[in-house]
Every structure is written in C-alpha cells, then in structure tokens.
Image (spheres, grey):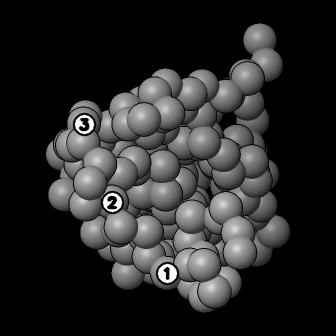
Amino acid sequence: MTDLSHLNEDGEVRMVNVGDKQITHRTASAEATVLMSPQTLRLVREGGLQKGNVLEVARIAGIQAAKKTSSLIPLCHLLPLDGTELEFTFPGDGQIVVRSTVSTSARTGVEMEALTAVSVCCLTIYDMCKSAEKGLQISSIRLLSKTGGRSGTWTADLPE
C-alpha cells in the first residue's frame, strides 16, 4: 500500500524491524536556541536564579531525555547510548544555543535522541528561568548532522 517504513502493507502503524541491519557506529548532533532578555541571561550565567545552576541542571535533563527517547517518541527503538554531550554557547545578548551530540553502536540512528536531548534541555532552561521571565522562547530545534548506517553522513546546510 505504501513505501513508508512505519506502515505495513495494510497501512497500519508498525515499529520497523532493524534486526537485519548491520551494527555500525552512529552519531547525531542537534541544536536549539533559547531566547531571553539580557537580564535573565546574566542571572543564568552568574547563578542568580532561585532554582540553582540552570545550565548544569538542564545538561542533566538533556542527558536523561536522550536515554528515555524510546519512552517518549512512539516507534523509536531503545538504543544503548555510548555517550551524550550537551554544550552551551552564548552568541548574543539574550541567547543560549544548546547543542547535543549523541553516539551509539547500533542498528539504527540516534537523530531522535539528539533532538530530544536539546528539546528537554531547553524546556528545563525555561522551567528554571520562568520565575524571572515568562516570555522566554525556544526556537530553531534542528538536526545538524548524522553519521553511520546505510545512508552514511548527512550535514545540514548551515549559514556562514
């Protein structure tokens, strides 16, 4: 009926069987941006918020989220993660860019784990900062790159 991998010949949803795929080393990187006032960002960077160290709590949340992706996203496979890293950059007043890199040796990729990690990390930043500012924005959640598997390496077209 369809060429979509998550539908069977009758159009019913299914989890793709990856049992015949080769185990390969796979990585994925994703990023998202949290926008806030310069004053709130200063509080984040100086540790001036009531809930504590925003970035370290958010980092832990992102790592936990990557490990729980198969519980959160229907039809995702449970993967043994080799590593999950989250880093923060501050490209402008009132911006935190969160980047995750996730790796595994498995039969399927870790794109969803990388995307879930940055998403939950940003949601945690929001939660920890909402007492100072309710209007924070989470934007530009996107996959940056992936390696491994049949489709090989893919990299997003990034602006210079």
SS at circle 2: loop
Q: Is residue 28 above or below residue 119?
A: above
Q: Nearer the viewer, residue 20 or 89?
A: 20
Residue at screen point 66% across, 46% down: 142
SS at circle 3: strand
- Number of marks in the image? 3
Residue at screen point 75% across, 63% down: 136
Is residue 51 among the parts visible in the rendering? no
SS at circle 1: loop
Residue at screen point 71% across, 75% down: 1
User: Residue 70 vs residue 98: left or right?
Assistant: left
Q: Amino acid at mark 2?
A: Val
Q: Amino acid at mark 1?
A: Arg
What residue does disc 3 label?
24
Q: Nearer the viewer, residue 106 or 18?
A: 18
Q: Nearer the viewer, residue 6 or 120?
A: 6
Residue 117 x/y as whole percent:
45, 57
What residue does disc 1 label?
14
Q: Is residue 23 above or below residue 47?
A: above
Q: Indicate which disc residue 18 carries.
A: 2
Residue 79 x/y as whole percent:
26, 61
Q: CA distance from mark 3 to mark 1?
A: 23 Å
Is residue 135 among the parts visible in the rendering? yes
Q: Earlier in the sequence, mark 3 or mark 2?
A: 2
User: Residue 140 vs residue 100: left or right?
Assistant: right
Q: Earlier in the sequence, mark 3 or mark 1?
A: 1
Q: Are marks 3 and 2 in contact (CB under 8 Å)?
A: no
Residue 81 x/y as whole percent:
22, 53
